[in-house]
Amino acid sequence: MYQNEKTISEKEIYKGRVVHLTCDEVELENGYKTLREVIHHPGGVCIVALDEDENVYFVKQFRYPFKTALMEIPAGKLEYGEDHLECGKRELKEEIGATAEKMTYLGCIYPTVAYDTEIIHMYMAEGLDFGEQHLDEGEFLDVTKMPLEEAYKMVMENKFPDAKTTAAILKTYLIKKGM
């Protein structure tokens, strides 16, 4: 079983506003050389916002790659060097207009391990206080809420294709059920 690949060279193919792409030549443990295409991403944060009645807040927004609107939990991209807790607080305020008394770290996920460096940090926000949304320019979304129990059922029925939403809802549900 191979446990390591040595990078021989790295060539930048594209540098964009959010991601950049490299094509790396690597040497495997058996001496074989091959190419690895890697999308470099600064990472992100997602938040399960729970009110006192255990309703979860969702945002519905158009996702261009899939040409459809998807319902997701609030989330956003980390700025380079930004603390993920601070990013989570910022995104919660921007997307649903809320601040939280308590932010519980749920862990992180690597959503696309084969070719992408993105890491998403997950939080559960409680003790919500609502104000105004502060959406980014060019950001359009609708906010809705549903009971955690219903959100869990929707996850189990594969109604949320978004991986971060699925993972964070499952973790939150298990915590709230004392598991």
Image (cartoon, helix red, strand yellow):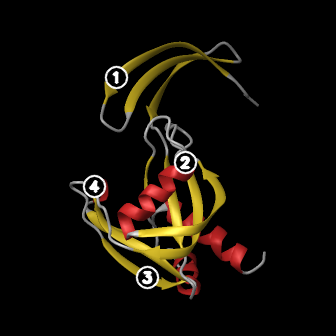
- SS under mark 1: strand
Picture disc at residue 13: 1
- SS under mark 3: strand
* Mark 1–mark 3 distance (CA, rounded to whole Å): 41 Å
Instruction: Check disc 2 and report the residue beneath it.
Output: 84
Instruction: Check disc 4 and report the residue beneath it.
Output: 136
Q: Give x and y (percent) for residue 46.
A: 50, 59
From the viewer's perspective, is residue 19 above or below residue 175? Answer: above
* Mark 4–mark 1 distance (CA, rounded to whole Å): 28 Å
Q: Earlier in the sequence, mark 2 or mark 1?
A: 1
The amino acid on which the numbered mark 1 sits, given as a three-letter code, is Ile
Depth check, mark 2 against mark 1: the one in front is: 2
- SS under mark 2: helix
Depth check, mark 4 against mark 1: the one in front is: 4
From the viewer's perspective, is residue 137 above or below residue 59? Answer: above
Can residue 6 be spotted in the picture?
A: yes
Instruction: Check disc 3 and report the residue beneath it.
Output: 145
* Res 95 → quadrant: bottom left
